[in-house]
Image (cartoon, rainbow, N blue to C red):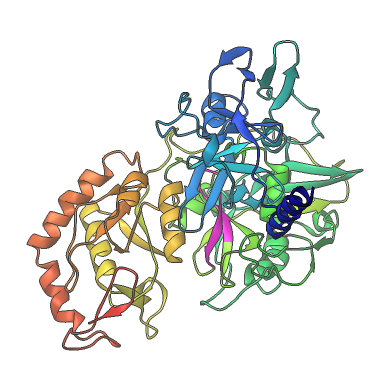
Amino acid sequence: MKKCVSLLLCLLLVLACLPAGAAAANVVWSSQNLTVNGRPVECEKYNIDGSNYFKLRDIAYLLSGTVSQFEVGYDPQARVVTITSGLPYTPNGEELIVGMDKSSTAVPSTQSIVIDGVLNSEISAYNLGGNNFFKLRDLGNELGFTVDYDKASNTAIILSAKPAPESDPADLGNVVTFGAYEQDNNSSNGKESVEWIVLAKDGEKRLLISKKVLDLKEYSYGYSDVTWETSPLREWLNDEFITTAFSDEEQGHIAYTSVKTSDHSVFHTEGGGDTTDRVFLLSIEEIQEYFSSAEERQCPYTTYVYSLGRVSLLPVEGCCPWWLRSPGSEQNLTVWVNAVGAPDIFGTLGVNRMGVRPALWVESYSFLTEPEAPIDTQESSEAPQSTTLTVALSPDFKPLEYVDVTKNGQEQFVGFDVMLASFIAAEMGLTLVIKPMSFEACQVAVQNGSVDMSISGYAWKEERAETYNLSNFYYPDGYDGLVILLRKGADEMPAKVNEILVKASAAGLYSQWSAEAATVAGADTSREVKYDYEGNPIE
């Protein structure tokens, strides 16, 4: 009896020493069936502590092409999984693979989940074998598809959303006209009526956003910190724009709105103080609320905007990026929506001229009218071809790319990578536009198509080769070989760039740089100090 008591005490002591929460989740292969829009499918799924989890990429693959389709992306450096509603899914070849049981590898996912640009910290996810698995109902609630369950057959049922029915003229999603602004780039015929999309309603009040990008403006000047409260674009909207676009009588219909801008949900940069505005920009949270897909967030530009230049037309012809008011990953960066309708949560510098889509509340919808005829019709049905080459770089990697504080505008960006970008643009017959941003944001910008390429001291890495089209090596003085990042599926661009790299070498670009490199301020004139691929000085 004493021996049994001793054994029991020992067992209790061992259990007491175990850390709280040490018990592992109960993970087994799920026997649940699945149908998608009535079609039975086989996919990888697990039962974890009584709930069924399905691989995210499998569900994206099965819903691609439906109203509920969504794209999946992953930033390995930031450990961020991005889900963008409305975009077709890009397969990676690992979808719907059934066979190997990975239940022993299950751990709660530690990666950030960002849905349409907003961090979602509530959704439950597990990582098994390097892939994220989610509950179907969690995904359905976020992405707009229906999940049901048939107990008799033990079947989970996914039904994609149906297209919204036609609404009344004063209802949400309709287009109305209000005010006038130059749009056809022909001032002799007067200003054209502005078309607005009805985003929300509150009694008689209506929230409107311009259907098209109406102008190109900087969000801030220089490289100092900025919020919506301090942005010169806010001042322009509530002064010059409102008096230009609306008569005194029309201005009387525009409500004063209390505008709150939240801190960044991932990087916690400050949104700034609350403001009272008549005209404002949407926040990243508001575009998630008011637009159900990336396609809805794509915004066309007017002929007047195109005449201003520096409009990124790729990869969606006729559409261009537009500003939001939310802070980016650093306090001097601001979030924006790219041409394909995806928000860039890292943001870009406010000195970049970006599309402006004003938003405002009107006190009553009774005076709003429907468009009578197409506004700002192009002479040709085809969208104009881009005349610019947009190149993202991080100008903090001396001597390859950095800022010359004695210069302004595009001329302030200097270094070999800038020299090479200029050579490539000239060979293509295009005007070079440098897009300065953080090193991580440069790579995201290439991936989502908001820039044509990124030249920023990239070493060849296997994971980069899997995510991007990489150019052949180029050899600035002091480096073994660097590559240019281009978007996957960028048609003939990689081959064209490789041809130009050969021309650059034959033209003596590397020799020219060798002579100039020694004069770079802050660099050792003997070239004994060099930099590794992460920007650190090495002997």
- Image location (x, y in percent) of residue 244: 68, 61
Quick check: is 358 in the magenta stretch?
A: no
Rendered image quadrant of residue 136: top right
Q: Residue furthest right?
A: 203
Quick check: is 345 in the magenta stretch?
A: yes
Q: Main secondary structure of the magenta part?
A: strand
Residue 189 to residue 56: above or below = below
Residue 332 visible, this orientation: yes
Residue 98 to residue 1: above or below = above
Q: Residue furthest left?
A: 506
**Label tally:** 0
> Foreground residue, 175 or 370?
175
Residue at screen point 53% across, 29% down: 58
- Image location (x, y in percent) of residue 176: 74, 39
Residue at screen point 16% across, 73% down: 477
> Foreground residue, 417 or 150?
150
Quadrant where the C terminus is found in the figure:
bottom left
- Image location (x, y in percent) of residue 509: 14, 67
Q: Which residues are magenta?
A: 335-349
Residue at screen point 43% across, 39% down: 383
Tell me: 517 left or right of 207. Answer: left
Rendered image quadrant of residue 328: bottom right
Rendered image quadrant of residue 206: top right
- Image location (x, y in percent) of residue 321: 52, 52
> Foreground residue, 268 or 210?
268
Tell me: 421 left or right of 243. Answer: left
Residue 220 to residue 255: above or below = below
Residue 376 visible, this orientation: no
